[in-house]
Amino acid sequence: MDRHEEAVMQLLTANGETFVAPKYEVADGWQCPAFVALRPARRQVYVVEVSASGYPLALVNRLNERVEKWYAPLLSQLHGLGITQPDWEIACLVFVRSDQIDWLKERVKDLSGVHVLGLEQASSPWVWDDAVWTSEMRFDAGGIPQRGGKAVGLTH
């Protein structure tokens, strides 16, 4: 796990109710996203990807295949293990460099359920608003709440 993934893991788990599995093998190891995050209190599953690349083309390809390669097999695995129920929601959290957000969003065919956030803000806990550390934190809210009331980061 690199430092960027460690920073994202800190953000994901800061609320005290999100559990993460790094490099979880989806579909018998054919796909290993950075994390699978479970938030039982909200009945949510997130496939999480992290990239500090200046040209994350491989990430775009994975995002464009997320339903077939991640969502369907992952939900089947989690249901089979008794971890989730059929009514749980699934979405994708993507953390990339801020200068790559627009580039990435232009290339993903369908952004529904894909939330793109700035890696720099995820890596800066000293500027996170107190809400990040509570169960009120929403990963799909359009950004990472920052001190002073401003959410930084973009989403679909």
Image (cartoon, grey):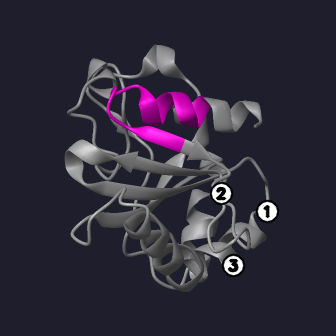
Name the N-terminal-most of marks 1 and 2: 1
At 63% from the left edge and 74% from the top edge, which residue is drawn?
27
Q: Residues within 10 Å of mark 1 (few under 14, many from 20)?
A: few
Where is mark 3, residue-wise?
61
Q: Which mark lies nearer to you, 3 or 1?
A: 3
Where is mark 1, residue-wise?
55
Magenta residue span: 7-20
From what the image shows, is residue 63 above or below residue 19? Answer: below
User: Callout 1, which amino acid?
Assistant: Tyr
141 left or right of 26 in image:
left
Where is mark 2, residue-wise?
100
Q: Considering the numbered disc 2 on the image, is that residue within a helix, a strand or a loop?
A: helix
From what the image shows, is residue 51 above or below residue 119? Answer: below
Q: Residues within 10 Å of mark 2 (few under 14, many from 20)?
A: some
User: Callout 2, which amino acid?
Assistant: Gln
Does any portion of residue 21 appear in the rendered image?
Answer: yes
4 left or right of 98 in image:
right
Asked whether the beta carbons under mark 1 and mark 2 sit within 8 Å of each other, the answer is: yes
Q: Nearer the viewer, residue 106 or 18?
A: 18
From what the image shows, is residue 47 above or below residue 62? Answer: above
Residue 110 locus on image (x, y percent): 46, 82
At 21% from the left edge and 69% from the top edge, which residue is drawn?
87
Position of the N terminus, as image quadrant, is top right
Asked whether the beta carbons under mark 3 and mark 1 sit within 8 Å of each other, the answer is: no
Residue 59 locus on image (x, y percent): 69, 67
Name the N-terminal-most of marks 3 and 1: 1
User: Callout 3, which amino acid?
Assistant: Asn
Q: Which mark is residue 144?
A: none
Q: Considering the numbered disc 3 on the image, is that residue within a helix, a strand or a loop?
A: helix
